[in-house]
Image (spheres, rainbow, N blue to C red):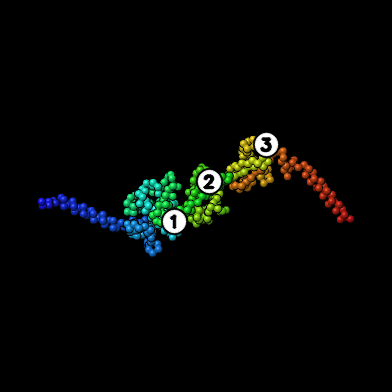
Amino acid sequence: MAPTKPNRKTKTKLTAQRKSSRRKSSSAANLPRPGTQDKENASPIVNGEDSPQPKTDDPHEQNWWKINVEKAAALIERCMKAYNWDRVETKKILNSYRQFLSLKKEHADWDATYLYPCWPVDQMWLHHSQMEDYDYDMRNLLGHVVNRYTLAVGADDAVDVTKEALKQRFGSVDEELWNVINVCIVDQLGEEETIEVNMREPLSTFFERYAQKKEESVEKFQFVFDRKTINDDNTDGEATPMRLGIDRSNNKIRASHIEKVAINIRYASENKERGFLIDKTSMISTTFDEFAKEVLETERFKLVFLFQEKRVYGYESPVVFNMKCRDNTIEVVAVESYKCKSCICCNPNQNIEKDTSKDTGVQEDSSDAASFAD
């Protein structure tokens, strides 16, 4: 039986399909489109050691990174500017970011089911998502648009899973990028709060959260590490554990409210004490009332309060005594056992002795004058 000749409509349809196939093939061979890089931050010349070196055997991905050198360079520049990273460090993070995206593709983890990036990689991902044609990049690299969001729960398990997947896929993990440290924030009353921070992560985010818990603005607090105020014109860019030199043996940051003073009231005879945080300009009397009633279960008039051996009556404010923001101790004694060193009522004998010595001194001076006259 002779084959049926295609009519005109069939020919037209086949021709259109061939043209469409050619266009798709041409698009796959030339993945990047001109002008897709971030023009504001793009580096005009990127070659030599500045060119990102791929660490994947996927030829499609290798071609994309090679052809999109300017876009990769723009991403490097953005992150260097945002986090004050040097170029070598940022290129290392770029390679880890590419490895993470490869894992996303291989495991089809489009909804962040179990893969979790380390903090530097996550920040590079953030800046990439803010660049032009991010969706286009993801489709070409992964064949799927990946929205940037990470796990809300189970992050600890996800870290172990991700690191193990990286080892299996690429043979090793850049542990330095995953390195975290426990930083301890100590308030004026000595209470401690421990936070886990990546060594490159700015501490400002945690300071803001700390202030929110205290229901204050972060500007009301001063954070000090190693006797230096953090970000008081003595750090290079954003303060991070790495830049400050925080390590596991020296990881305490002292947080102080700039308008408040911490006072520790101590009754040594019964080994009882309590800390109070009060405004610098408010009277101290309310803390005395609270200490007497709640700690010693007695009346305030039965007690005497001393700061640096000077009696405090309660109507004074911390400013009067030049108290520091922390480490101020007020000693408490029973009124019947208190003796003021300079008070006449507490030391009547001392006053008599002074008067006697004064009279003796006058007589001695008179006799000396008489003998001189003779």
* Dot placed on the residue nearer the N-terminal end, 1 or 2: 1
**Residue lying at 36% horizontally and 50% vertically, measured from the top left:** 107
* Numbered disc 3: secondary structure: helix
* Dot placed on the residue nearer the N-terminal end, 3 or 1: 1
**Residue lying at 79% horizontally and 46% vertically, measured from the top left:** 354
Q: Is residue 66 visible?
A: yes
**Residue lying at 51% horizontally and 43% vertically, measured from the top left:** 213
Q: What x and y, as percent, mark residue 71?
A: 36, 57
Q: What x and y, as percent, mark residue 262?
A: 59, 44
Q: Nearer the viewer, mark 1 or mark 2?
A: 1
Q: Is residue 193 above or below residue 99?
A: above
Asked if residue 153 lies left or right of residue 359, the reply is left
- Could you tell me which quadrant the C terminus lies in? bottom right
Asked if residue 284 lies left or right of residue 60, the reply is right
Asked if residue 196 lies left or right of residue 36, the reply is right
Q: What x and y, as percent, mark residue 340?
A: 72, 43
Residue matched to label 3: 301
In the image, what residue type sits under mark 3? Phe
Instruction: Give the camera-side residue of 89 and 39.
Output: 89
* Numbered disc 1: secondary structure: loop
Q: CA distance from mark 1 to mark 2?
A: 29 Å
- Residue found farthest to the right: 374
Q: Is residue 70 above or below residue 210?
A: below
Instruction: Report crowding for label 3: few under 14, some 14 to 19, many 20 or more residues within 10 A (C-alpha).
Output: few
* Numbered disc 2: secondary structure: strand
Residue 18 circle label: none
Q: CA distance from mark 3 to mark 2?
A: 37 Å
Residue matched to label 2: 193
Residue matched to label 1: 174
Instruction: Give the camera-side residue of 310 and 33.
Output: 33
Q: Nearer the viewer, mark 3 or mark 1?
A: 1
Instruction: Report crowding for label 2: few under 14, some 14 to 19, many 20 or more residues within 10 A (C-alpha).
Output: some
